[in-house]
Image (tube, grey):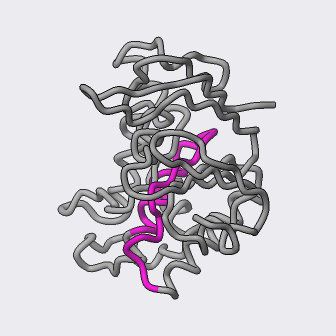
Amino acid sequence: MNLLEIKDISKIYGSVAALQNVSLSVEQGEWLAIMGPSGSGKSTMMNIIGCMDKPTGGSVFLDGVDISKESAKNLTIMRRDKIGLIFQQFHLINYLTALENVMVAQYYHSLPDEKEALAALERVGLKDRAKHLPSQLSGGEQQRVCIARALINYPMLILADEPTGNLDETNEKIVLDILTQLHKEGSTIIVVTHDPEVADEAQRTVVLEHGRVARIVKGNNVKGADI
C-alpha cells in the first residue's frame, strides 16, 4: 500500500523550474532516501512532501488525501497529525528544556503529557538530559531531542532533512541506529541527504538532477553509484 503518491509534479519559481514532472511512490513502511547536488530540487521536494509548500502542477497524495489541493490551514493540520519532521538545524526553542521542547509538539497536537514526553526522550537515550537547555546539549543530543519531538505524536511519516549533516561520526551512527530501529518497527521514513553513508541505509534512493528523477538506486549500492 502506498502511503505517498507523487504524480507528475512541477514547481516553478518565476522562470526557474525547481521540479519538473516528477513522479514517485513510497510504500507504507518503506525507507527512502532522496539525493542530488545542490539545486537539484531536494529541498523543494521535501517542502512539498512535508506540507510546507504546494506544487505548481501535478498531484501529491498523502494517506489518500491530495495535499496539492488543500488549503494552508489544512496543510498545517496534515503536517501536525501525520508527519514527524527532523531538521538539520534542530529548530529547538532555546529557552525551553529538552523535555519542554518535546512537549511543545504535544501542545499543538492535543495535550502535553510529561510522562509520555519523558518516555520519548528515554527512547533516544536522553532521559537524564530532560531538564537541560539546548545550549547545554551537544549537537548529537540536540538532534536526538529533535527526533523525540518528531515521534511524540506517532506520525505515519518521518521526514528527515540532512539529519546527520551537522554531526560527527559517533553521533551520526547513534542517529542512524535510531532511524534503523524505527524502520524495523514499521515506520515510513524519507531522508533527504547528501551523504551516501546515510542513503545506503535506505531501501531505495531517488537521485534528483535539475529538478528531475535521474535514476533510482535500490538497496545498499549508493556508494558505488555515480551520484
Q: Is residue 190 left or right of residue 74?
A: right
Q: In this orientation, which residue lies closer to the viewer: 226 or 171?
A: 226
Q: Is residue 133 left or right of residue 32?
A: left
Q: Is residue 110 visible?
A: no
What residue is rendered at 76% in x and 68% in y? 220
Above or below 51: residue 183: below
Above or below 34: residue 194: below
Q: Residue furthest bottom?
A: 170
Q: Position of residue 128 (x, y in %)?
A: 45, 79
Above or below 117: residue 127: below
Q: Is residue 209 left or right of residue 4?
A: left
What residue is rendered at 41% in x and 75% in y? 141
Q: Position of residue 217 (x, y in %)?
A: 72, 56
Q: Residue furthest left?
A: 95
Q: Quadrant of residue 99?
A: bottom left
Q: Quadrant of residue 74?
A: top left
Q: In this orientation, which residue lies closer to the viewer: 53 or 156?
A: 53
Q: Quadrant of residue 137?
A: bottom left
Tell me, yes or no, whether the highlighted magenta stretch contains residue 13. no
Q: Position of residue 63 (x, y in %)?
A: 65, 25
Marker count (numbered): 0
Q: Is residue 217 left or right of residue 172?
A: right
Residue extent of the magenta highlight: 143-168
Tell me, yes or no, whether the highlighted magenta stretch contains residue 154. yes
In which quadrant will I find the C terminus?
Answer: bottom right
Q: In this orientation, which residue lies closer to the viewer: 9 or 154?
A: 9
Q: In this orientation, which residue lies closer to the viewer: 45 or 156?
A: 45
Above or below 84: residue 20: above
Q: Position of residue 2 (x, y in %)?
A: 75, 31
What residue is rendered at 57% in x and 16% in y? 66
Q: Is residue 191 visible?
A: yes
What residue is rendered at 42% in x and 68% in y? 143
